[in-house]
Amino acid sequence: MAESTSNIFKRRLLKSFGYSMQGLLATVREEEAFRVELLLALFLVPLGLYLGESGVAKALLAGSVFLVLIVEIVNSAVESVVDRFGAEQHELAGRAKDQGSAAVFLALFLVLLVWTVVLWPAAA
């Protein structure tokens, strides 16, 4: 008997969730910067949800913090792929790592900007 489309979808969804959890746990285990940012997020997200005066404000405050975590995971993935291909110095490998780091820096700057504008209206 053929498996139903909904069962196939559920099985694939469950597998995808498992792969995502493996990636998240690997990042927590292997990346110190992510662990620091995760600890900050555990403090800042609830604080942002408390301090935000509207749904939009809460979403901006919490979302900007989640964006840092997302960008850090992508940066770690880029670094892993670059490191996979060897330890020798290469201009493109260095550039890729620097660009990943720059993306994290900009995400952190965005947190500062969003929190300042949302929580200190005179800055807007």
Image (cartoon, helix red, strand yellow):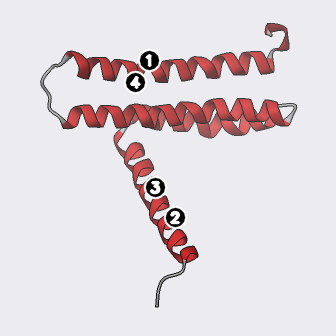
Along the horizontal axis of the image, is 106 left or right of 79?
right
Where disc 2 sits, the SS reads helix
Query: Residue 77 at what x, y percent from top left?
Result: 36, 37
Q: Nearer the viewer, mark 3 or mark 4?
A: 4
Q: Is residue 92 left or right of residue 61?
A: left
- The residues tagged by marks 4 and 2 sit, at their Cα atoms, a distance apart of 29 Å
The disc, 3 or 2, on the residue closer to the chain's N-terminal end is 2
Mark 4 vs mark 2: which is more N-terminal?
Answer: 2
Q: Nearer the viewer, mark 3 or mark 2?
A: 2
Label 3 or label 4, whichever comes before in sequence order:
3
* CB-based contact (under 8 Å), mark 3 and mark 1: no
Q: Secondary structure at mark 4?
A: helix
Q: How far across and how far down the image is residue 32, in percent?
A: 39, 34
Residue beneath the point at 15% across and 19% down? 89
Look at the numbered disc 1 and give the secondary structure of its residue.
helix
Query: Which residue is labeled 4 in the image?
Result: 100
Q: Pointer 1: what residue?
A: 102
Q: CA distance from mark 3 to mark 2?
A: 12 Å
